[in-house]
Amino acid sequence: MSTNDPAARSGPYALLFRHVLRRLDPETAHRLTVQSLALAHAVPGGPALLRAAFGTPAPLRDPRPVRHALGADHHSPLGLAAGFDKDGEVPLALLDLGFGHVEVGTVTARPQPGNPRPRSFRLPGDEALINRMGFNNHGAAELAKSLARARRTERGQRAVIGVNIGKSKATALEDAADDYRFSARLLAPYASYLAINVSSPNTPGLRDLQTVTALRPVLEAVQEEAEDAARRLRREVPVLVKIAPDLHDEDVIAVAHLATEVGLAGVIATNTTIERPASLRTDRTRIEQIGAGGLSGPVLAERSMQVLRLLRRELPEEAVIISCGGVTEAADLRARLDAGADLVQGYTAMIYQGPAWPGRLARQLARGR
């Protein structure tokens, strides 16, 4: 459940986490991290320094991509899951850390503050997180402006930046398709791909959209906007749907078949879980005190792998699967790829292992470890 890599247990970040970051509210620590990345990326020579310090070192650099997926070249199969850079403030800096792609968001049609704080909690003994952020973000229009700025440079144009869109809390479920359509229309021109989030546990009723009847109009609305943008841009804008690990297998299969029928590029599996497994090491009293929210971390690995195998069996060969949930080490990354994932995403492990994590996994994968 925890990393077995000694390098991740020692060094400057381990000391920083143990003596500073762990003492801060998780959301405050996160905000400081984003601000630090923005500052480092803004100074002259900053991007090169980030790549040298955390990305793939010169001996392992190779101009050939590791794989081609979603119409783009990926120099690492590991990407950053949605939730870290909700408003697209630092996608290029995150890519400099060694991620092959970055998924920004979740963003909603209109700005919203999210749930009351505190709303993010660490479970250090499990290297896990519980969050009930509630899609706090500045809205689709502001994200579009941020991504437009990022895309102005040559490097920004080549960057693989996915955009994760969700339903506004104030929007009724029956109006969800129009809500998603609005965001897709604004953001498709700047997105390497669009991800439809219907699986966060922190927006009331959202997971009800995973039923096939409710999901169809949402998928169709976003797919139509993506196709319209593709005609104007003369490039594909792939669309994926992100599902919860808590779906029953038959529901996973139903969503997979619907995604294929509607013409989506694939599926992201999985989001956080509302379950609190008995395998958690954290004291149950503490878990009960934290209350509701989505659980992420190594505890998700088994179910995430089950869903991946199920999707690979049910989806067409050309459909893309991004496997997410419980990825901690290079061995996890390799196992997901061997099980049929086209790409893999992580987030929680970086909180515990630091900014060197994505580059380290990319190097270890390249060395065949």
Image (tube, rainbow, N blue to C red):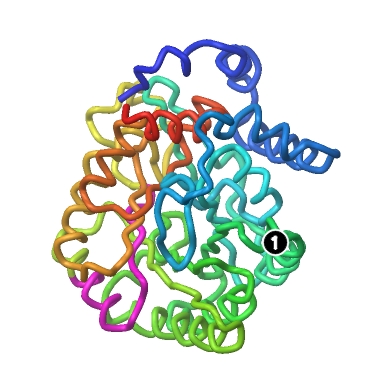
Locate residue 65, reporting x and y percent: 46, 51
Instruction: Name the quarter where the C terminus is drawn.
Output: top left
Instruction: Evaluate whether residue 293 shows in this view.
Output: no
Q: Is residue 100 left or right of residue 138?
A: left
Residue type for callout 1: His
Locate residue 215, reporting x and y percent: 34, 77
Q: Residue furthest right?
A: 44
Instruction: Name the quarter where the N terminus is drawn.
Output: top left
Give yes or no for residue 68 being in the magenta stretch: no
- Residue at the image point whose x is 29% and y is 43% from the top: 275
Residue 31 in which image quadrant: top right
Q: Residues within 10 Å of mark 1 (few under 14, many from 20)?
A: some
Residue 296 in which image quadrant: top left
- Residue at the image point whose x is 33% and y is 51% from the top: 323
Q: Is residue 281 above or below residue 269?
A: above
Q: Secondary structure at mark 1?
A: loop
Locate residue 181, reporting x and y percent: 53, 82
Q: Is residue 312 above or below residue 224?
A: above
Q: Is residue 123 above or below residue 111?
A: above
Q: Quick one: 260 or 83, which is closer to the camera?
A: 260
* Magenta stretch in the rendered image: 254-272
Q: Quick one: 12 or 63, which is closer to the camera?
A: 63
Instruction: Evaluate whether residue 26 shows in this view.
Output: yes
Q: Which residue is mark 1?
A: 138
